[in-house]
Image (cartoon, rainbow, N blue to C red):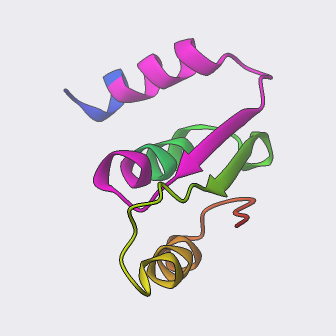
């Protein structure tokens, strides 16, 4: 799938004014979605939150927080 198709799919799913609550666990799926949202949606509409799945290893929470900061995920909260 090319980049333009990804943008269109995301735009059609979230609309033009909807705020998006995205939960990030640190896994590939949630981090990929967070990065795609950051790239294709107005960042004022994205609200990323850390999701503790209850299966994290010691220190993994801190790694996810550091990764979110390094990626510049908008409105990231723990």
Residue located 47% across and 59% down the image? 54
Name, please, the residue furthest toward the front. Answer: 54
* Residue 16 percent across, percent down from the top left: 73, 20
* Residue 23 percent across, percent down from the top left: 58, 46
Name, please, the residue furthest toward the left. Answer: 1
* Residue 12 percent across, percent down from the top left: 54, 12
Please tell me which residue lies in front, 70 or 1. 70
* Residue 32 percent across, percent down from the top left: 37, 49
Residue located 58% across and 77% down the image? 69
Task: Quarter of the image for the C terminus: give it.
Answer: bottom right
68 up-or-down from 17: above or below: below
Please tell me which residue lies in front, 1 or 68. 68
Residue located 71% across and 41% down the image? 42
Residue located 50% across and 49% down the image? 34
The residue range painted magenta reads: 6-32
Please tell me which residue lies in front, 59 or 72. 59
The image quarter containing residue 75 is bottom right
């Amino acid at each position: 799938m090319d980049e333009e198709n990804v943008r269109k799919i995301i735009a059609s799913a979230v609309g033009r004014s909807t705020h998006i609550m995205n939960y990030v666990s640190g896994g590939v799926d949630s981090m990929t979605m967070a990065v795609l949202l950051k790239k294709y949606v107005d960042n004022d509409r994205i609200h990323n939150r850390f999701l503790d799945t209850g299966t994290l290893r010691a220190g993994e929470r801190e790694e996810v927080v550091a990764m979110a900061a390094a990626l510049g995920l908008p409105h990231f909260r723990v």
